[in-house]
Image (tube, rainbow, N blue to C red):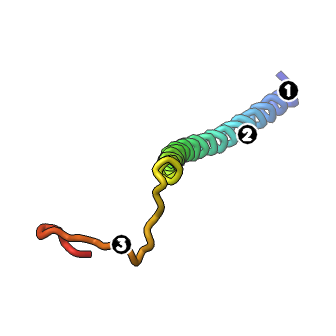
């Protein structure tokens, strides 16, 4: 084989080695980013579940208050009219 052919083969070998290193580095960066996004996705799913639970709780409370006002003609008492009673075993705030 001629010298030029050997030089060309060595140059192609180095170029392909550098390309493999570059592609592997890019893959690792993308994989790390994907892992970060998966963790973020899980955190958002948990937060979404909490928000749905909170919404259900608030909706239920509003529904009870609305029914109490409309059907039972109940109103919120004036804070000055509220009297707290404590039993012997209860601790005072």
**Is 35 positioned to the left or the right of 17 in the image?**
left
| SS category of the residue bearing label 2 | helix
| SS category of the residue bearing label 3 | loop
Q: Earlier in the sequence, mark 3 or mark 2?
A: 2
- Work out whether 10 lies above or below 76: above
Q: Earlier in the sequence, mark 2 or mark 1?
A: 1
Instruction: Tell how many labels.
Output: 3
Q: Nearer the viewer, residue 92 or 42?
A: 92
Q: Nearer the viewer, mark 3 or mark 1?
A: 3
- Residue drawn at x 63%, y 45% is 33
Instruction: Give the numbered dot on residue 5.
Output: 1
Q: For mark 2, what is the residue?
A: 18
Q: Is residue 55 visible?
A: yes
> Do the CB atoms of the residues marked 2 and 1 lie less than 8 Å apart?
no
- In 3D space, how far apart are the residues under numbered discs 2 and 1 (Cα atoms)? 20 Å
Q: Position of residue 18 (x, y in %)?
A: 73, 39
- Work out whether 60 lies above or below 75: above
In the displayed orientation, state which residue is furthest to the top.
Answer: 1
| SS category of the residue bearing label 1 | helix
Q: Position of residue 5 (x, y in %)?
A: 85, 26
- In 3D space, how far apart are the residues under numbered discs 3 and 1 (Cα atoms)? 98 Å
Q: For mark 3, what is the residue?
A: 82
Instruction: Give the numbered dot on residue 70.
Output: none
Tell me if mark 3 has few (under 14), some (14-19) or many (20+) residues whose alpha carbon lies within 10 angstroms of its own.
Answer: few
- Residue drawn at x 26%, y 75% is 93
**Is 2 positioned to the left or the right of 83 in the image?**
right
**Is 24 positioned to the left or the right of 84 in the image?**
right
Tell me if mark 1 has few (under 14), some (14-19) or many (20+) residues whose alpha carbon lies within 10 angstroms of its own.
Answer: few
């Amino acid at each position: 084989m001629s010298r030029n052919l050997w030089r060309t083969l060595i140059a192609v070998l180095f170029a392909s080695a550098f390309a493999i290193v570059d592609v592997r580095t890019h893959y690792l960066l993308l994989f790390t980013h994907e892992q970060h996004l998966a963790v973020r996705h899980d955190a958002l799913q948990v937060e979404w579940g909490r928000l749905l639970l909170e919404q259900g709780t608030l909706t239920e409370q509003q529904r009870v208050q609305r029914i109490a006002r409309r059907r039972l003609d109940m109103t919120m008492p004036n804070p000055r009219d509220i009297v707290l009673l404590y039993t012997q075993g209860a601790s005072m705030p």
